Image (cartoon, grey):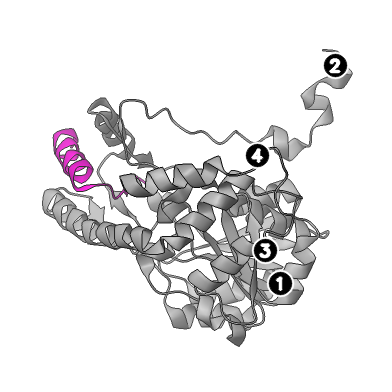
């Protein structure tokens, strides 16, 4: 390759400075690093889904407006009357679309920090400036700092992950309301973990014209489908529709998602099991770490727990050596030093996690 065709010559500096998103190999391990629902579909539903997918015309493009899937989402997932949804190839694509749509010269996107890394990544890719506002020491929203940052930077988008990833907590409603009232642009509440938080900002869409609610079906138990949806007022969706790639949701995903929504009670039952398991796992971890200096188990309303241990990287390595894969988030932010993010799994997976952690400390 000639020098003039080298990536270092042709690509943007911020792209060259980035590192690719790494997904570790989980072969042979108890996989508790990616907040997946560990429960498969019951056998009768798997067989029925197989028949449904076999009838899909994979030689044809999808319906361009996904009318029936959007209708099913509105009816089954609590979208208020008069509001519609925009579909994405996972919520990541919708985050990208929102960031690109608002990336005028000097545009800012803003989020409490630490939070979901794709908010910052998408800002870099779009050429916007990202501002992260540190959370309070207990990982709650620092309202004075948020309001000051909003007043200074006038962000086009404020991202609020609710519950927040990787901390697991939901910010208090009055704090979120103050952000909604102060923001000059769009406030996107990212409810990726809504099945485990129960509460939602979706019913309040009519109350705030600058509110959008972003969700994914991944944490519900459909991570392999890569389907996200954004609910917002029509003027926002109309403009974002111009950026949505045609056929961005494939026909198999569309058919499987419609099937899943017909059997939503199955996934809601699995989420209820995981919520109960989350509390049991948190109790077991608190008992295990009670006498370990420098440790903590933080409250969570997601399907994972944030845990601080004396030495996060070493503990993660020992867990992996014992067959359990978790996420080391300690390098994301100074406030997360020595923190591990543990996905809530099945009862047996949680037992193996606790036992491996006991041996690893």
Q: Which mark is residue 67?
A: 3
Name the residue: 52% across, 54% down: 257
The answer to which of marks 4 and 1 sits earlier in the sequence is 4
**Mark toward the start of the polypeptide (2 vs 4):** 2
Eye-nearest disc, 3 or 4: 4
Which residue is the site of mark 1? 154
Residue 360 among magenta residues: yes
- Mark 2 or mark 1: name the one nearer the start of the chain: 2
- Of 145 and 115, nearer the camera is 115
Asked if 211 appears above or below 303 in the picture, the reply is below
Closer to the camera in the image, 80 or 10: 80
Residue 207 in the magenta stretch? The answer is: no
Q: Report the front residue among 147 and 261.
A: 261
Q: Is residue 341 visible?
A: no
Mark 3 or mark 4, which has the lower sequence index?
A: 4
Q: CA distance from mark 3 to mark 4?
A: 18 Å
């Amino acid at each position: 390759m000639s020098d003039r065709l080298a990536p270092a010559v042709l690509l943007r500096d911020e792209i060259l400075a980035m590192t690719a998103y790494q997904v570790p190999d989980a072969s042979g391990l108890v996989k508790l690093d990616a907040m997946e629902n560990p429960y498969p579909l019951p056998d009768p539903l798997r067989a029925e889904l197989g028949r449904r997918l076999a009838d899909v015309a994979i030689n044809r493009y999808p319906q361009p407006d996904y009318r029936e899937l959007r209708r099913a989402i509105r009816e089954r997932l609590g979208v208020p009357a008069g509001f519609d949804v925009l579909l994405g190839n996972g919520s990541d694509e919708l985050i990208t679309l929102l960031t690109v749509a608002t990336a005028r010269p000097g545009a800012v996107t803003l989020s409490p920090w630490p939070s979901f890394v794709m908010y910052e990544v998408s800002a870099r890719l779009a050429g916007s400036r990202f501002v992260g506002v540190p959370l309070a020491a207990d990982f709650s929203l620092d309202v004075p700092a948020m309001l000051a940052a909003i007043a200074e930077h006038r962000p086009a988008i404020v991202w609020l992950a609710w519950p927040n990833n990787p901390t697991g907590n939901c910010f208090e409603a009055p704090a979120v309301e103050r952000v909604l009232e102060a923001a000059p642009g769009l406030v996107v509440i990212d409810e990726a973990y809504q099945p485990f938080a129960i509460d939602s900002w979706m019913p309040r869409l009519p109350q705030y014209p600058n509110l959008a609610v972003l969700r994914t079906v991944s944490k519900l138990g459909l991570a392999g489908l890569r389907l996200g949806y954004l609910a917002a007022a029509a003027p926002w969706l109309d403009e974002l529709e111009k950026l949505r790639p045609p056929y961005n949701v494939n026909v198999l995903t569309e058919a499987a998602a419609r099937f899943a929504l017909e059997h939503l009670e199955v996934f809601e039952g699995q989420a209820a099991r995981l919520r109960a398991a989350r509390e049991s796992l948190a109790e077991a971890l608190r008992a295990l770490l009670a006498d370990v200096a420098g440790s903590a188990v933080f409250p969570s309303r997601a399907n994972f727990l944030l845990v601080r241990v004396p030495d996060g990287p070493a503990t993660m390595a020992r867990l992996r050596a014992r067959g359990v894969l978790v996420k080391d988030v300690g390098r994301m932010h100074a406030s997360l030093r020595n923190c591990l993010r543990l996905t809530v799994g099945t009862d047996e997976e949680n037992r193996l996690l606790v036992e491996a952690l006991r041996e690893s400390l």
